[in-house]
């Protein structure tokens, strides 16, 4: 018995003197000067098609626990319960999961949806890594992306769904629907068509100012001249002295509501350009007739109905359809980052996507309004339905009549109209 006790006492002393081995959090890689897109070192071998349920924020600790939960997955961080951004986040989630549903060997998508993008981004990101995320998509807002960038260390490919002014970090990439990028694309597009002078029509609204400044910055950098800046406040008489000249164009830094009030008062043969803010859908042909001939840029998802990916059911409002398309392309870019999909550039449903530094840049599709219908510039002119049954009228006469009627109506009511701000994107 004494010998047994001696052996047990010795073993206990050895155990007490040996440091405990605890599985700690993953070692974060230090940022590198150059970013290379490479597949993960150990590809996952088990794939699950159905996404995991939404993770509750109440389960997310403030500090890192000592163990990592198993389960390779793609983490999708979205503010689904936000009063301001919940609908936008839900549209992105729908598109992301729609794309994942067509991938037979997809990693499961785990949605981290109870997310405050001003305060809990870092904690949710850490939890996703500890849960075994192989890649992370999100957050959605600029504030959220700024908070994410402050984390500094990203052990897996991470795709934020907006842009932010921050120092590039290894494994952190940016992708979003920057409206300023569209304004710059319009400036380049108009320049390639021989136009040299621009009249910029804006309004005293944050979004209009962003569009105005982005367009003018690119326009002047490309050698163009800003002939005139007009702030529209409801008085259409300020357009009376605008005359059409061969090298002059108009840029609308406004949304559809103001554009359709202004457009009938401009010279009929004057080139007019805008961003996607001018397009609110093809359902209302009468509204689109007021925008006849305006060129703009928007997503292939809206301009080219035939797409590989499933549509939202029921259909979403136009702004949310754009976010749905963003979700589809976000999933595809995650596959690029994981080394599971074709290399860039990518012809996405949101546009032609390339990588510049750490930012995935999206080039939208040149489009225009023709006979009350918005379509890509290279598409055949689609026939329009007869607007007044029983009345014989060809498409050209119909367009002219409706435009004239709209001009009269706008002239009589424009001074009473209150400014309507275009809905800003997250």
Image (cartoon, rainbow, N blue to C red):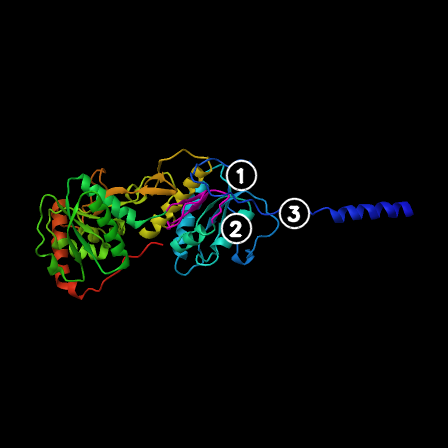
Q: Nearer the viewer, residue 73 or 116?
A: 116
SS category of the residue bearing label 1? loop
| Percent x, y of residue 328 | 39, 43
Q: State the residue at coordinates (23%, 54%).
A: 256
Determine contact: label 1, label 3, CB under 8 Å. no
Circle 2 is placed at which residue position? 126
Query: What secondary structure prevails in the magenta region?
Result: loop
| Percent x, y of residue 316 | 35, 51
Dot placed on the residue nearer the N-terminal end, 1 or 2? 1
What numbered label is drawn on residue 266?
none
Circle 1 is placed at which residue position? 47
Circle 3 is placed at which residue position? 22
Seen in the image, is 188 located left or right of residue 125? left
Answer whether residue 392 is magenta in the image.
Answer: no
| Percent x, y of residue 370 | 19, 45
Q: Nearer the viewer, residue 217 or 176?
A: 217
Answer whether residue 153 is magenta in the image.
Answer: yes
Q: Residue furthest right?
A: 1
Q: Is residue 394 visible?
A: no
CA separation in Å, label 3 and label 2: 18 Å
Q: Choose mark 3 or mark 2, whichever is in front.
A: 3
Q: Is residue 196 above or below residue 341?
A: below
Q: Residues within 10 Å of mark 2 (few under 14, many from 20)?
A: some
Dot placed on the residue nearer the N-terminal end, 1 or 3? 3
Magenta segment: 152-175
Q: Residues within 10 Å of mark 1 (few under 14, many from 20)?
A: few
């Amino acid at each position: 018995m004494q010998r047994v006790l001696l052996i047990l006492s010795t073993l206990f002393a050895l155990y007490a003197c040996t440091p405990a081995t605890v599985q700690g959090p993953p070692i974060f890689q230090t940022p590198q000067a150059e970013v290379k897109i490479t597949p993960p070192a150990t590809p996952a071998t088990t794939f699950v098609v159905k996404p995991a349920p939404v993770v509750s924020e109440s389960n997310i600790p403030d500090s890192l626990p000592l163990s990592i939960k198993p389960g390779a997955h793609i983490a999708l961080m979205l503010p689904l319960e936000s009063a301001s951004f919940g609908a936008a986040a839900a549209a992105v989630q729908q598109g992301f999961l729609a794309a994942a549903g067509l991938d037979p060997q997809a990693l499961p998508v785990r949605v981290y949806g109870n997310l405050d993008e001003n305060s809990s981004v870092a904690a949710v990101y850490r939890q996703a890594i500890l849960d075994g995320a192989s890649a992370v998509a999100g957050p959605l807002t600029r504030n959220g992306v700024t908070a994410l960038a402050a984390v500094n260390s990203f052990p897996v490919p991470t795709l934020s769904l907006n842009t932010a002014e921050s120092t590039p970090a290894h494994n952190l990439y940016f992708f979003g629907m920057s409206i300023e990028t569209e304004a710059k694309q319009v400036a380049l597009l108009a320049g390639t068509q021989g136009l040299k002078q621009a009249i910029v029509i804006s309004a005293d609204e944050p979004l209009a100012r962003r569009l105005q400044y982005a367009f003018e910055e690119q326009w002047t950098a490309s050698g163009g001249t800003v002939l005139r800046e007009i702030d529209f406040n409801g008085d259409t008489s300020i357009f009376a002295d605008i005359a059409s000249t061969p090298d002059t164009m108009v840029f609308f830094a406004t949304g559809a509501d103001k554009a359709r009030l202004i457009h009938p008062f401009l010279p009929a043969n004057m080139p007019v350009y805008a961003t996607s803010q001018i397009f609110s859908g093809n359902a209302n042909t009468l509204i689109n007739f007021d925008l006849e001939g305006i060129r703009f840029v928007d997503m292939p998802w809206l301009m080219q109905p035939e797409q590989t990916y499933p549509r939202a059911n029921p259909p979403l409002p136009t702004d949310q359809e754009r976010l749905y398309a963003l979700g589809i392309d976000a999933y595809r870019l995650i596959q690029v980052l994981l080394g599971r999909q074709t290399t860039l550039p990518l012809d996405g449903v949101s546009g032609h996507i390339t990588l510049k530094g750490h930012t995935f840049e999206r080039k939208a599709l040149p489009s225009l309004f023709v006979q009350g219908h918005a379509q890509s510039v290279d598409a055949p002119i689609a026939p329009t339905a007869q607007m007044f049954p029983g009345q014989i009228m060809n498409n050209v006469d119909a367009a002219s009549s409706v435009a004239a009627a709209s001009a009269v109506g706008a002239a009589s009511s424009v001074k009473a109209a209150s400014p309507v701000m275009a809905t800003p994107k997250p």
